Amino acid sequence: MFGATGSGDTSGYAGLVAPIIYPAAAERPFGGWYDVVADSIHGLIERVVIDRGEITFHIARQNLVAAANILRDEQRFEFCAGVHGVHYPDDAGRELHAVYSLLSMTHNRRIRVETTTPDADRHLPSLVAIYPTLDWHEREAWDFFGMIFDGHPALTRIEMPDDWPGHPQRKDYPLGGIPVEYKGGTIPPPDQRRSYS
């Protein structure tokens, strides 16, 4: 109905996994000011992706602090709007992604910086000393995804209780829930509703 294809299950609990198609790396010249920014952190970049007119610099975690300093001081990306955690369990060796949204108020430009870490070693350098606005954002990424930001002044849970087991935004976290009773029926938790095997 209404253009739905495939199984028609829109609940999200079917265990259906859509393939993740990553945008391909862009080739130089990127165009305009993108090249100037790329040149300033040239030796620190793993790859550059331009998708839908937005540029993302993929940087290895060991180069993250150096790149952030250059972007803030030389390219005038004075403001970091936040760090966003993403969990790709099938991306072996790069399961956890940290995506930083940077803004240059001087030049009215926006970029993204993305770094990855394996699930087995979830340590990333903290950027709070460079961008103080990341204080609570890094705590949230720790709380929900389990990323450990080395050098953070107070890396504690920010939304979940201190004794909460696990990190609830990861894709391997159980959905859980409690049965809800209505007159004449019971609705079980999402991960117990149907069997798809």
Image (tube, rainbow, N blue to C red):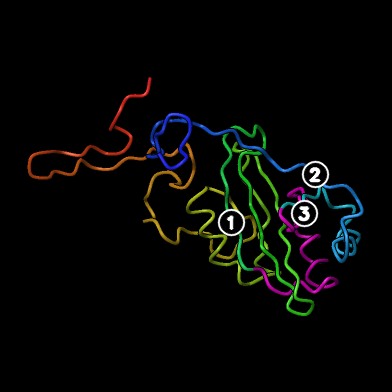
Circle 1 — which element? strand
Relative image position of residue 129 (x, y in whole percent):
68, 69
Tell me the kind of residue under disc 2. Answer: Ala
Q: Say what amino acid the circle numbered 3 marks.
A: Phe
Q: In which quarter of the image is the C terminus?
A: top left
The circle on residue 84 is 1
Give the spatial CA distance, label 3 vs label 1. 15 Å
Q: What element carries label 3?
A: strand
User: Over which residues does the magenta segment extend?
Assistant: 52-80
Task: Name the mark nearer the viewer: 2 or 3.
Answer: 2
Tell me, yes or no, whether the highlighted magenta stretch contains residue 6: no
Of mark 2 and mark 3, the one earlier in the sequence is: 2
Tell me if label 3 and label 1 are in contact, CB under 8 Å: no
Please tell me which residue is depicted at 76% across the width and 59% down the height of the picture: 65
Which of the two discs, 3 and 1, labels the residue nearer the N terminus?
3
Q: How far apart are marks 2 and 1 (CA)?
A: 21 Å
Instruction: Tell me what residue is drawn at x 90 percent, y 52 percent.
Output: 43
Instruction: Confirm whether the magenta stretch covers residue 58.
Output: yes
Residue 57 — which label? 3
Percent coordinates x, y for residue 31 in the rendering? 88, 60
Quarter of the image where one finds residue 117: top right
Mark closer to the chain start, 2 or 1? 2
* Quadrant (top left/top right/bottom left/bottom right) for the N terminus: top left
Q: Residue at x 47, y 47 (%)?
A: 169
Front residue of 136/37: it is: 37
Q: Residue at x 58, y 65 (%)?
A: 153
Label 2: element kind:
loop
- Residue ID for mark 2: 25
Q: Residue furthest left?
A: 183
